[in-house]
Amino acid sequence: MKVRQITPSVYEVSLGVVNTFLINHDELTLIDTGSEGSTHQLIQAVEKIGRVPKDIQHILITHCHADHTGGLAALQKACDATTYMHPTDAALVQQGQVLRPLTPAPGLLNKGLFQAFIAKSPSEIEPASIDREVTDSEILEIAGGLRAIHAPGHCAGQLVFFWPQEGGVLFAADTASNIGWLQPSIAYEDYQLGLRSLRKLTMYQFEVACFGHGKAIKKNAVNQFRLKWLK
């Protein structure tokens, strides 16, 4: 587990191959919970920034895949937080079923990475409760205002979160990755829909982009998105 400060209030918590995020802005907000067994590491991360688990008031889940939701049920037992999710994926998480069919993005590298890291991904997690279902463009009264953006493609119920403070921070989930360079995700339920979602994100003004996989872009992030996907 590694904790990296991205902006004055945003921390990236690296849990091996997946990242989760903390917004330390009055109340503490967690975005995604990592895989099953991640709870102890997340608690350590919270303590590392000077807070305690009970300070977590909000848990935002970007999408249903096990590397983002596997730790949810256990973490809910450690804090008294409200959990938010898009209804399309919330239905699966509440049943403990978290994987629809995926296909690799175009390219031989993606096919290889898909076989190595995604083809055998868990399809089940411990069922977890979702307190509030969130739809596209909804403004959540969290951290001074967070906009939820429905961004399907990689996953039908995927949400991206846009925080306009501190230069504008986009929590891009798995709409894209930044492992070595900015690129689409390795796998999709619908690749063309995923590209449309990426173009949709370029409408927002964000200096910083945070990803489920790969390093955050800390400067001119929206310009990089526009150069990549508005061709």
Image (cartoon, rainbow, N blue to C red):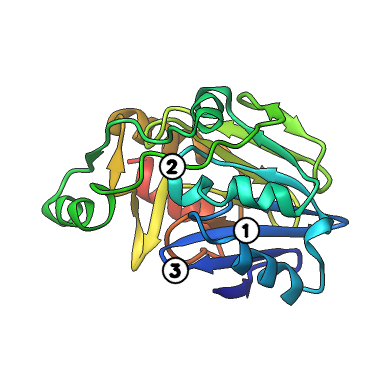
Q: Residues within 10 Å of mark 3 (few under 14, many from 20)?
A: few
In the rendered image, is residue 22 in sight? Answer: yes
Whichever of callouts 3 and 1 sits on the residue coming sooner in the sequence is: 3
Q: Residue at x 39, y 55 (%)?
A: 177
Q: Which residue is mark 3?
A: 16
Kindly identify the amino acid type of the residue bearing the numbered disc 1. Answer: Phe
The residue depicted at 71 percent of the width and 28 percent of the height is 132
Q: Quadrant of residue 199?
A: top left
Q: Residue at x 18, y 52 (%)?
A: 115
Q: Amino acid at mark 3?
A: Gly
From mark 2 to mark 1, how far is it between C-alphas? 16 Å
- The residue most toward the right is 26
Numbered label attached to residue 21: 1
Q: Residues within 10 Å of mark 1 (few under 14, many from 20)?
A: many
Q: Secondary structure at mark 3?
A: loop
**Quadrant showing the C terminus:** top left
Circle 2 sits on which residue? 65
